[in-house]
Image: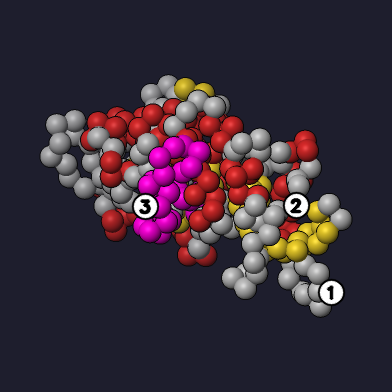
Amino acid sequence: MDISAADNIAASALLHEDPELAVVYEHLRVLDPTGQRFAAVLRDTIDQLLNGEITGRYDWKTLFKTEKTHAGTLVEINLQREFKFADGESMDYCIAGVDVDCKYSQQFGGWMIPPEAMGHICLLVWADDYKTCWSAGLMRIQREWLNGGNNRDLKLTVKAEHRDKIAWLWRDTELPENVLLHMSPVDREAVYAQSSGQARLNELFRRVQKRRISRNVVRTLAQQKDYMKRVRGNGGARSALREEGVIIMGDYESHKQIAVQLAIPVPLEGEFVSVRVTRVSNPQDIRPSTALDGERWACATSADLPERAPSLPTHVR
C-alpha cells in the first residue's frame, strides 16, 4: 500500500516549505518508485540478524538484546550498499547533495534522534515482522518536535503529535513475508518435527502452498551451505513431492509464466511457490490452467486425487 491521500497532502506541504527535503524525497522516489528495493533491504537485514542458516531462528523475539541494538546499524549499512549513497559530511549519507541521517526502529515512533541531528534531515525507517509491514519517511529535525530524554547519550524521540511533520515516502507498505513466523502453528510444528533439513523442506512445500517462500526460509530449514540442492530435482523437494502432484516454481521466467497461468502468487527473485496440480480433461472446466507436456493442468482442489506432476522443462529443474 502506498501513502494515503492525507499523508500525500501533508508531504506535499512539507516539501513545498523545505527545498532540500523535496530534493531528497524526489531522489529516493526515483531510485525506488515502488519501494520494492527498500522492502528487500529490510527483509534481508532482519534475516541477516536472525542468521537462520546457523541458528535456525525465524522470530525477532529470539534475538539477543545486543543483536536488536545492532539492527539500526545494519539497516543503515545495507541501505547505503543497495542505493550507493555517498557518505555525508556530518550525517550518515549524502543524498542528492544533502546530508541525511538514517534512523531505524522496530517499534513505530521509537526512532532515537541524537543531538547532532538537530536541524538536519533524518530518514526514519520502521519495519515490523509480525505485522508484515514497513514505513519510511523524511523529517527535518527540530528540537521542539522531540520528547525529552533521560538516556545518557541524550537521544530523543519524535513526539506523537509531530509525526505529521514526516514526509512519508512509503507508509504501512507490505514487507516480504516471513513464512516461518506466519504459518499456522500446527504446520510449523509438523515441519520442525522432521529429522533432516531435506524432510523439513519437503514438509514445508507440502503444507505451505500458493505462498511465496524466500530463499532464506529454505536456508533456515536446510541449515547447510548447499541449501538450494534441497529444492531442486534429482533428490530434492521437487523430486520428493512429484508423486503427490506438487510442483515447486522458482524465479525462472518459465516458472513465473506457469504461476501466472495458474493465477497464484508469482515467485519473485530468490523465491519459490509450491502448488498441487491436477490434470484437466473436461473442456467445460473453467479453472485457470497451464499447458505442460501437451496436457492441461490446474490447481487441485480437495476433491481431486493427487496425481503425478508433469515434468518441468529440463533446463529449469
Gap between marks 3 and 2 measured at Cα: 30 Å
User: Where is mark 3, residue-wise?
Assistant: 189
Give the residue type that dot 2 points to. Answer: Pro
For the residue labelled by badge 1, is the local secondary structure a helix, a strand or a loop?
loop
Tell me residue 255's x, y (percent): 72, 47
Q: Is residue 293 above or below residue 198?
A: below
Report the amino acid beneath label 1: Pro
Q: Does residue 264 appear in the picture of this structure?
A: no
Cα gap from disc 2 to disc 1, whole angstroms: 19 Å
Q: Which mark is residue 310?
A: 2
The quadrant the C terminus occupies is top right
Mark 3 or mark 1, which is nearer the start of the sequence? 3
Question: Which range of residues does the magenta coloring cover?
Answer: 174-200
Residue 121 location (% of width, % of height) = 41, 38
Name the amino acid, label 3: Glu
First-in-chain label (2 vs 1): 1
The one of 262 and 13 positioned closer to us in this rendering: 262
| Observer able to see residue 260 | yes
The secondary element bearing badge 2 is classed as loop
